[in-house]
Structures are given as structure tokens and as C-alpha cells.
Amino acid sequence: MDMIRNEIASCEEKAYDSLALHDAATLLFFDSLDQVLAFAQSN
């Protein structure tokens, strides 16, 4: 799942000037905003 999330995140960076955390969580298949923040900080 990490590989898929990394690919999606890469596409999101190119496709969106900005993206709400809630929307990023949905697109990256996370259950909580804390998970999105942890993912973003690790990348």
C-alpha cells in the first residue's frame, strides 16, 4: 500500500496547487488526518 500511496502522492503534487487534508486522506486511503500528516512528514 505504501508504494501505491507514494505514486498517488506524486501525482497529487503535480495535479493540484493545493489540496485539503480531508481530500488527501480520501485519495490516499487513510482513515484519519493524523495518518495523512504522518505520511506527509515522512515524505
Image (cartoon, rainbow, N blue to C red):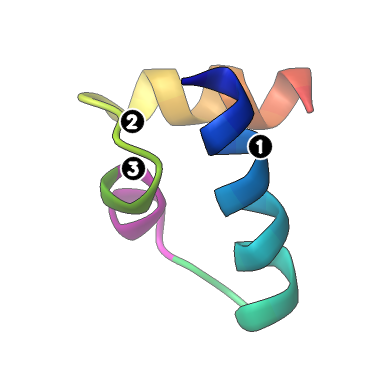
Cα distance between the residues tagged 1 and 2: 17 Å
Magenta region:
20-25
> Which quarter of the image is occupied by the C terminus?
top right
Is-magenta flag for residue 9? Answer: no
Q: What residue do we see at 65% from left, 32% from top?
A: 40
Q: Is residue 38 left or right of residue 36?
A: right
Is-magenta flag for residue 24? Answer: yes
Q: Quadrant of residue 16?
A: bottom right
- Residue type for callout 2: Leu
Give the number of the mark in front: 1 or 3.
Answer: 1
**Helix, strand or loop for the magenta stretch, by majority:** helix
* Percent position of residue 26, x then y: 26, 48
* Percent position of residue 33, x then y: 33, 30
Is disc 2 placed on a helix, strand or loop?
helix
Is disc 1 placed on a helix, strand or loop?
helix
Label 2 crowd bin: few (<14), some (14–19), many (20+), radius 10 Å: some
Q: Which residue is mark 1?
A: 6
CB contact under 8 Å: marks 3 and 2: yes
Q: What residue do we see at 72% from left, 24% from top?
A: 41
- Residue type for callout 3: Ala
Q: Quadrant of residue 35?
A: top left
Residue 17 visible? The answer is no
Cα distance between the residues tagged 1 and 3: 13 Å
* Percent position of residue 38, x then y: 57, 17
Is disc 3 placed on a helix, strand or loop?
helix
Q: Nearer the viewer, residue 22 or 8?
A: 8
Label 3 crowd bin: few (<14), some (14–19), many (20+), radius 10 Å: some
Closer to the chain start, of discs 1 and 2, is: 1
Q: What residue do we see at 75% from left, 18% from top?
A: 42
